[in-house]
Amino acid sequence: MATVELTFSALPAHVRTARLVATAIARRTGVAEAILDEVRLAVGEACSRAVEAHRLHCPGEPVRIELRDDAGRFEVTVTDAAPGEDVTPQVLEADGSLMPEMDNLGIAVIAGLADDVEVLPGPKGMRIRMSWPASPHGIAAL
Amino acid sequence: MDLKLDHHSEDNLTIVDVEGEIDVYTAPRLRELLIDLVNKGNFHLLVNMEKVDFLDSTGLGVLVGGLKRVRAHDGSLELVCTQERILKIFRITGLTKVFGIYASVEEAKEAHGRDK
């Protein structure tokens, strides 16, 4: 089992970096090229959600992402440290109010993309774990 | 890649060319452009997404927000997109039923002309 851990400041600009790292490691782990876009989008959604949660509740705390090569699965866990139950990337109207119909869209997208998803809310933050099939021997097997 | 935005008008239609990645970092710029266009009286928008590399739910939210805004003026917001990776997120969220999605700017312009 090989694990890469990444922590980053809760800034929207860093979400792209997290996506790129996740995609690179997914490729290295042996995730099929055809589903790398799904990995990239799902990880981006989870990180966006975490960044927004931190910006609301604990902007000084970093977001944590773990990428694991686990017995033929590529597993990603995004953990935030924000209390609260339901924070999604916010879509604001011109007057600054939330667009309620877009709530939870990020989670819905993740559920539609990841092969296996677990959303674990907790008093000290939320964990989103998702995984995809990967080559047991990673890219070296190709 | 960052986000590049450009727009021009043809007859009654304003074409917004988007290039790059639309995510939680860049989506506010697209939102500001759409709001600005509507505030200036452009109520028929065509967003050309053929050069968009990445779109997430934040970007979808901005497009839905733009659609709401133009509809308040009996306008329209339609899309040009043929990339499977981008279309997939519209399908997952059911938004293919909400937006008119065309294969080319020309096709969208023809449809818009018929609807006028």
Image (tube, coloured by chain):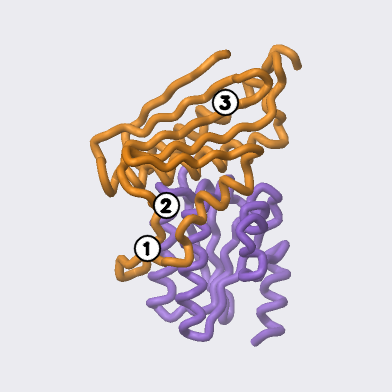
In this picture, residue A42 sits left or right of residue B112: left
From this viewpoint, is residue A130 visible?
yes
| Residue nearest the observer in this picture, A29 or B109 | A29
Q: At x 61% / y 58%, what residue is drawn?
A: B93
Q: Chain of mark 2?
A: A
Circle 2 residue = A88
* Circle 3 residue: A24
Question: Which subunit holds the residue at mark 1?
Answer: A
Kind of element beneath mark 1: loop
Residue A25, above or below B114 = above
The residue that disc 1 covers is A92
Nearest to N terminus: mark 2 or mark 3: 3
**Which amino acid is tagged 2?**
Thr
Residue B82 rendering spot, x and y as whole percentages: 71, 55
Height in image: A51 above or below B35? above
Q: Which chain is orange?
A: A
Query: Residue at left 70%, top 63%?
Result: B104
Depth check, mark 2 against mark 3: the one in front is: 2
Query: Label 1 amino acid?
Result: Leu
Residue beneath the point at 63% across and 44% down: A113
Circles 1, 3 touching at the beta carbon (< 8 Å):
no
- Give how far apart the Cα atoms at labels 2 and 1 are: 12 Å
Residue A119, x across and y down, in percent: 50, 41
Chain B colour in the picture: purple
